Amino acid sequence: MTDLDLIADVLVAGGGPAGAWAAVKAAESGADVVLVDKGYLGTSGATAAAGTGVWYVDPDPASREAAMASREALGGYLADRAWMARVLDQTYANMNELAEVSRYPFPVGEDGGQIRRGLQGPEYMRRMRIRARRSGVRVLDHSPVTELLVDADGAVAGAAGHRRQHDRSYRVRAGAVVLATGGCAFLSKALGCDVNTGDGALFAAETGAELSGMEFSNAYAIAPEFTSVTKTAFYSYATFYHADGSVLEGAGSTRGRSVIARALLSERVFCRLDQAGEGIRQAMRLAQPNFFLPFDRQGIDPFTELFPVTLLAEGTVRGTGGIRLTGYDCATSVAGLYAAGDAATREPICGGFTGGGSHNAAWAMSSGTWAGQAAARHARALGARRATRAVRGAGRAGLRPTGGDPAGHREIIEAVQAEVLPYEKNYLRHGDRLAPALAALDETWKRARHGLRADGPDVVRARSAAAMAAHARWMYASALARTESRGMHKRADHPGSDPAQHHRLISGGLDEVWVLPETGWPLAVAS
């Protein structure tokens, strides 16, 4: 029996910026909105833990052209100019809203004007929570979704989950659902990413939705050995060293991260931010005080002293793969289901490459806006049917095992991490390593599908374990299918790009994973 049963027009799953914007815009469109978050809306997720740049460009044709052209080559020319232009327009509007409606305290430049090219995550998300509540959004904190609900026609009709602090189940029947649950970082301990286990992608696939760009999922961020803080942009001012103090030639934060990865396979790597002048140092401390907190606590001056570094997997949080979108409204191929932020593929604006912040932050607020508005329209068209439809749970692995030897969530998570966290498998890709890793993951999925089940609060962990296993299989199946190097997907056995593979790859399936070329990219459907 469900302990809490709610009805809403729109259910938003996820409390990062994409989810917050989706909830606000759905409410402003007249919808009754419930937002559920794995953590606490305003503090959970990668954005809330740090500062971020934003792809905010003045509406000057030359500036916009330069902004769109700047990363096309890095992304393997898989981005779409029409999507880029729309994101630039929407981001410009949303950032201005933050200033004018939410009164966000942007810094002021020498000309007296506000500088709106970045956001401090804690303050940004604090204000988004306030705005969501003021818009009438009902917020269930610490209430992760465990499965989507579907009606007799297979349309998404809500979600079920577990309220951690109450140790009770809940169900929300809704006219439409927006998945803004983030990407998957495989519990690598990257800052703010422990809630990002790919749950939304699993939920979507269980209802029949597809994924796209899952080969672009091998993002690794530089971090000191003694902290989970990842701020790779700062390492553009760094020199990297062997343990004996000699320079690690070719190592760098943007070009040369693979050199660091290779070195870490056999030795420790050290770093010093010795290329930052005094003015840059002061600016860095003002922009990202949390980056320096671990150093200050240990009495290390990162500008003058060596410190050991590692690479932390960020998967699809900083990769570009995710749930495939079918149009500008951020709909999926399943009726009633929308996706936004890191849960959705970011290929439309980034192709096969993205870094932290900037495009990611712009995509979160833009896709969240469109998904929320479209979900409200869909729910309005359903009318009273949203509450009278018979629904059933779509969840499988971790909820409804097929039988077999019992499997625990810790066992599944450890097996997945053994295949996706090592640099030599996921980052330094080669078919000879990818194929056996995928075979091992297939076996892990079988164990999860047959024997993984839990009750109460552990059901959330079981479902996250299943999501990680599914995510990893889509990643490696897509990586094997793309027999070239493009974007962040680099294969040592296929080092060049292949013009015949200038297309996106869609993937899907659970017990049987499939990958196909998307010969016709998703049609842009006007909203």
Image (cartoon, grey):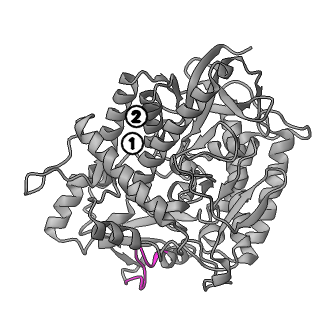
Mostly what secondary structure, the magenta segment? loop
Q: CA distance from mark 2 to mark 1?
A: 7 Å
Name the outermost residue toward the left.
111
Tell me the amino acid under the disc marked 1.
Ala
Residue at (72, 51) in percent of width and height: 469
Q: Earlier in the sequence, mark 2 or mark 1?
A: 2
Q: Residue flagged by tag 2: what amino acid is it?
A: Gly
Contact check, label 2 and label 1, Cβ < 8 Å: yes
Q: Quadrant of residue 306?
A: bottom left
- Few, some or many residues within 10 Å of mark 2 (<14, 14–19, 20+): many
Expressed as whole percent of the image width and height from the top left, the position of residue 466 reads 72, 44
Rendering coords of residue 509 (x, y %): 79, 52
Q: Secondary structure at mark 1?
A: loop
Residue 225 placed where, x, y %?
A: 44, 60
Give me the residue at 62% from left, 47% from top: 198
Quadrant of residue 507 in the image?
bottom right
**Picture disc at residue 48:** 1
Outermost residue on the right side: it is 404
Q: With 119 as the anchor, is 312 left or right in this view?
A: right
User: Which residue is at 45% across, 41% downward?
Assistant: 369
